Structure formats: C-alpha cells, structure tokens
Amino acid sequence: RRFDLDRFEAAILYFCRELEKPFKTKLNKLLWYFDFLSFKRQMRSATGAIYIHLPYGPVPDEYDFYLANLVRERALESIEIVYDEEKGVAGEIFKAKEEPELSLFNEVEHDCLRSIVSNFQTMGAREIADLSHGEMGYKQTADGEMISYEWAEEMQLPAGRKE
C-alpha cells in the first residue's frame, strides 16, 4: 500500500482516544506494531508507512514531518500536542480532539487496532521502546535503515506472546 495520510491520521487519533498519555515515542511504536501486525495478518500494511531503525526504536520515516503536518496544516481541530512530564522526563503527548475515521479500515485492521491497544495500554514509552528493540526487524537492521515488512512474521507481542 502507498502511504495514506488519512489512514495514518485515523490510527493516531484512535490510539490517542484509547490510551492515556500517548507520548510521541509510544505513539511511533504503536504505529509500527499496528502496520506490521496488519501486514502479518493480511500481507498489507494499514497505513503504508515506511519504518526506519532509530536509536529509540522503529519509527515511521519522516515521522516528525507527518506529525507536524497533522497538527499544524491538516488537522488543527483534531490533534493537539501537550507537553508533559512522566517520571521526570518531559515529552510530547498527543491528544485527539475528534473521533478517528475508522471506516477507512477493514475488519482485520480494526482487530489489529484493538489488539495493539489491548497489548500495550499499560506500557509506558520507555517500556514499549525497550520491547521494540527485541524485535527481529529492529535487531537485524542498523541505525537509519528501513525495516522491511518481511520481518512482520517474526513480530512478538508483550510477554513474548507470538502473534
């Protein structure tokens, strides 16, 4: 799938609605797990995003650009960034101000969204970043490299439960 900003925004809004304090680091990992789980289940990512290996884990390529675009240019009414501090670390929390357009997703993708929330809702940004570092797709790539969707089959969910 080619990158679809509408689907990307809908996933972000969904995670922001369903999770308390989704810091940017956590949000980036949730998007990665969502797309890779979708690919694993239906051989197609949900948003079409490309993910790269960065020191804090996998992130959508050009994520700062896309997130800034959603906040400033495209969705001033739907997403806001709040600066907050968790355990002494300041960060950006994304808040949804409107409902996500879930009709963009098929039933498999809806299930993937629910699964990601269920598996990661109690985890903090650092914990999910650490977990993502154990994923084969991350471990087998170097800093700045693209993480191939071929690694989706090896993806683990919390507590080592293979999807």
Image: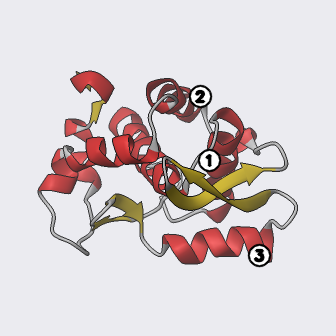
User: Of tags 2 and 3, which is closer to the observer?
Assistant: 3
Q: How many marks?
A: 3
Q: Find residue 72 and name its label.
A: 3
Q: Are marks 2 and 1 in contact (CB under 8 Å)?
A: no
* Picture coordinates of residue 62, whole percent (x, y): 47, 75
* Picture coordinates of residue 133, whole percent (x, y): 23, 50
Left or right: residue 50 versus residue 142 is right
Quadrant of the drawing holding the C terminus: top left
Left or right: residue 145 versus residue 93 is left
Residue kind at label 3, given as amino acid type: Arg
Left or right: residue 9 versus residue 72 is left
Give me the C-alpha separation between circle 1 and circle 3: 18 Å
Q: Secondary structure at mark 3?
A: helix
**Residue at 16% of width from left, 47% of height from top?**
136
**Residue at 78% of width from left, 71% of height from top?**
74
| Residue 129 appears in the picture as rendered | yes
Q: Secondary structure at mark 2?
A: helix
* Picture coordinates of residue 21, whole percent (x, y): 62, 43
Q: Which residue is mark 1?
A: 11
Residue kind at label 2, given as amino acid type: Glu
Q: Find residue 152 and name its label.
A: none
Q: 138 above or below 69?
A: above
